[in-house]
Amino acid sequence: MTMDTERFAAALESRAQAVEAALRTLLSDHLLANEIARPPRLLAAMRHGVLNGGKRLRPFLVMEAAALFDADGPAARRVAAALECLHCYSLMHDDLPAMDDDDLRRGQPTVHRAFDEATAILAGDSLLTLAFDVICDPATELSAERRVRLAGNLARAAGIGGMAVLAGAEGQARPPDHRAARQRLGRRGHQRHPARRCRLRHQARLARAARGLDEERHEDRGAVGGDPAPQEED
């Protein structure tokens, strides 16, 4: 490997370890305020779908963007972990029999194979809501206004007008060639992928929050908030 490649690999691994530690804390047995229980089987399924390897590229991008403004501290790490929770939720549900019906994810049995379909659905649901819990929690040490902005941005990108579009058209039954159709849709739509757009906005807003910049005077532009530049699939 070249020196640049080695540095990148080392930085990716370092960020991955930091986010992994944050995820393990978020998925601990410890009850948070107003939680009534953390069912062991459900929690085990969530851990199976999250703590199973992966490059953690999305958290890496959040953390590295924040680092440009000396803002890659605990708040950025929590937002990065929240984004990874949402990503892993999407993978869990994508693997379900009603979706892509996959048996393996990152070389291990998918959650619905390791546990059961109902548990996989609930685990994904729990990760999705956990992402917003983490961002909105005062423990994510950003102003309340900025936490609301981050949560709203993430919700818009993950919902009916965003990431869900790639899961299928209005819940219609999957045709036999649905996997090829999804790949075609992904290739056509990758330049406007809402999850990527959201990730870039999160990076920009974290950076602004760290520098105390005015949200209204520093709107997202170009690749940050408008039409993003073409990007490769990750």
Image (cartoon, grey):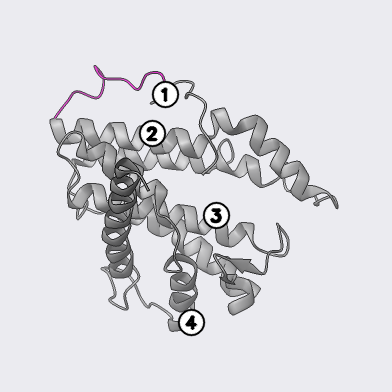
| Three-letter code, disc 1 | Ala
Helix, strand or loop at label 1? It is: loop
Q: Residue at x 48, y 82 (%)?
A: 41
Residue bounds of the magenta highlight: 212-222
Residue to which mark 4 is pinned: 41
Residue to which mark 2 is pinned: 200
For the residues labelled 4 and 2, the Cα–Cα distance comes to 34 Å
Q: Position of residue 33 (x, y in %)?
A: 26, 68
Residue to which mark 3 is pinned: 90
Query: Is residue 193 something one can see in this rendering?
Result: yes
Magenta-span inclusion, residue 220 = yes
Q: Who is closer to the viewer here, 10 or 61?
A: 10
Q: Position of residue 117 (x, y in %)?
A: 65, 72
The extreme right residue here reads 176
Query: Is residue 172 something one can see in this rendering?
Result: no
The label number, if any, that marks residue 223 in the structure image: 1
Badge nearest the viewer, 4 or 2: 2
Please give the count of numbered marks on the rendered protein. Answer: 4
